[in-house]
Amino acid sequence: RPRVLSGIQPTAGSFHLGNYLGAVRQWVALQETHDAFYMVVDLHAITVPQDPKELRANTRLAAAQLLAAGLDPDRCTLFVQSHVPEHAQLAWVMNCLTGFGEASRMTQFKDKSAKQGAERASVGLFTYPILQVADILLYQANEVPVGEDQRQHIELTRDLAERFNGRFGQTFTVPSPYILKETAKIYDLQDPSIKMSKSASTPKGLINLLDEPKTTAKKVKSAVTDTDTVIRFDPENKPGVSNLLSIYSTLTGAGITELEEKYAGKGYGALKTDLAEVMVEFVTPFRERTQQYLDDPETLDSVLAKGAEKARAVAAETLSRTYDVVGFLPAK
Ligand code: AQP
């Protein structure tokens, strides 16, 4: 079985619709066909200032949401990144292989550091993509299911894997991004020119899966469309409507053309009312299942402990081979 690896940050508490449609949904599908490793990336979460208590709670909350979304610990390996120390250890080796200029070209760092003020941004935020490289290479992943915003980081991973293999001999699998066209980028409901994101979105444009279903319905109904009235998939000229159609289509399995036909001659109001209903039907059981997992932290923690054990077995092997080929003296 080919292997997949991906991670999600516990920073925000609730996952948003972009996280789910862009990434987590694919994770659930891929556990059926791939040897799948999924993790809550708490090391990445401290690249911006964190509250320790909140981080711990949000790490459990992220794991609970992943299980609620359909990850099955018998079909995939689900773990917390900091439980596997090899991530930080391989990251150091990868840091030393990366050019400063190369790391400086990562657009996500530019965006995020600009928001915080470049002087205040941490060095951790700067090297975040390199930790991500280590995350992926440790597991010899063939594919990495992510949203479009992560493409550049997967490219960096490929470059570094090839560089390392060229310099020290074949050590790492060179991974490919696994990005579905339809959901590669979900847009903010109030400003469809920007991606839906926990930090950039307006509160009304961000669908948090754990919001009250009533709030979710309201946000969908007040989504920005355009002054035209035609329901047509045309991301360039009609980004708001096209975003709603993509979301609708993915959540229901209805084709885009089918939806265009269904709403021909009807106004945006009808589309939004129906989509609000679809969303409520999706988030209501999701919230309930998440709560059930949270209500039983012992079971949740033991799932994560087993996952970490499985993950470590793979990670330790890769790290030890890496340490050997770069020339570290083995500890006796
Ligand atoms: N709008 C989106 N459309 C499609 N995919 C998305 N992802 C995030 N936003 C969208 C994907 O979700 C996965 C997990 O994301 P993360 O935990 O790394 O968080 P992030 O990318 O930092 O999420 P945000 O909300 O976009 O955070 P900020 O505001 O900090 O930038 C990833 O696979 C990501 O591609």
Image: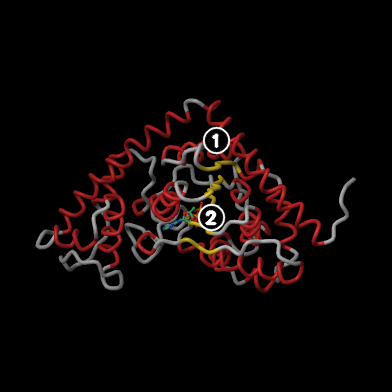
Mark 1: C-beta under 8 Å from nearest atom of ligand 1: no
Q: Is residue 219 found left or right of 289 in the rendered image? A: left
Which mark, by number, is residue 128?
none
* Looking at the image, residue 157 lies above or below residue 17: below
Residue drawn at (80%, 62%) of the image: 326
Please provide percent x and percent y for residue 150. 51, 62
Mark 1 Cα within 10 Å, few/some/many (few <14, many 20+)? few
Residue underneath mark 1: 57
Q: Is residue 121 visible?
A: no
Q: CA distance from mark 1 to mark 2?
A: 33 Å
Residue underneath mark 2: 2
Furthest residue in direction right, as rendered: 332
* Residue 82 occupies quadrant: top right
Give, as a three-letter code, the residue at label 1: Ala
Question: Looking at the image, is mark 1 or mark 2 earlier in the sequence?
Answer: 2
Please provide percent x and percent y for residue 158. 60, 67
Please provide percent x and percent y for residue 81. 62, 45
Give the label, 1 or 2, closer to the camera: 2
